[in-house]
Image: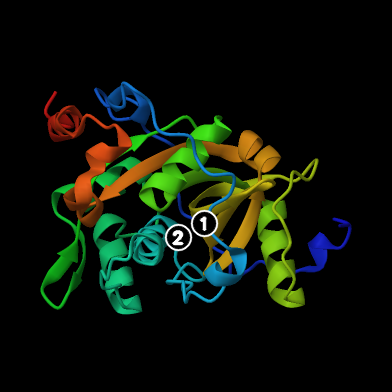
Amino acid sequence: MSDEDLPSYDTSGLRLGKKDAVRPRGLGVIKTYAPEGFPSPPASFGALAQLQTVKWGMDGNNTLGDCTIAGADHVIAAQNVWLGTFDPRPSLSELEAQYRVLSPTDEGCVIAEVLQTWRRGGLFEMAGATNQISLYAPFDHQDQTEFCQVIAFTGGAYLGIQCPQSAQQQFAKQLHTGQLVPWTVVDGSPVAGGHCIVAVGYVAEGLLCVSWGGVVLVTWSFLAKYCDEAWALISQELGEKGADTLGLDTAQLAADLDAIGAH
């Protein structure tokens, strides 16, 4: 597919909002907590046609730099699909209110700080309730197998990229044409800023991800060049169902997460 027409597509409504990647001191990568390793992943996970029927939502990322908060909502939606859970999703006003708490002047968020809030106090005050995760840890964002393992065994992955202008243009083209336009490396395209996307499946060519309320195919070559952080999340429901079936030392991971900020 030709990239020559990409500059003709309007990207003005495609905001970003991820700050630089941060690794909390004392927190290991996910393999640190899986001494026997994860099982081998299936060859593919998730059907594009099914994912395209989910109402993911732009979640305000057309006017605010709230991609990290929109990503949290997309994680909830993905886990509801793949894990059979029924967690409520926040309204647009609840999403925007949460973002304003973490980023009062709309400067974006650090993924690690969003995750810490999500686990400790929860996100999204919805009718007096919040959504919380049990555990989280980074994983190797250059390892294709780990991407597949995390997605297949936890229902998704929460990713940070340095988003090139070409990805915004490719997404805008996809919206305009109604045809899947993969995110590929376009030589010379400048980085527009940091962005959070959520991987909800994978195929041989790359990851199926949610961004700006749509499902995109993010190629492996694109991830190798632009992905700068990747996180595995364990929801409360998955924890209750037995996250240790993934081979995780959940007690040690919980202890390390509890210690963040206490050094």
Disc 2 residue type (three-letter): Gly
From the image, tell me which residue sits under label 1: 16
Q: Is residue 212 left or right of residue 71?
A: right
Q: Nearer the viewer, residue 217 or 225?
A: 217
Q: Nearer the viewer, residue 107 or 59?
A: 59
Establish if 99 lies above or below 143: below
* First reached walking from the N terminus: tag 1 or tag 2: 1
Residue at 56%, 39% (x, y): give it: 227
- Determine contact: label 1, label 2, CB under 8 Å: yes
Residue at 53%, 68% (x, y): give it: 51
Q: Nearer the viewer, residue 232 or 106?
A: 232
Q: How is the image coloured?
A: rainbow
Number of numbered labels in the structure image: 2
Q: Where does the image place residue 136, in percent across and percent down from the top left?
A: 28, 41
Disc 1 residue type (three-letter): Leu
Establish if 86 lies above or below 248: below
From the image, tell me which residue sits under label 2: 65
Q: Where does the image place residue 30, in percent across and percent down from the top left?
A: 35, 30
Q: Secondary structure at mark 1?
A: loop
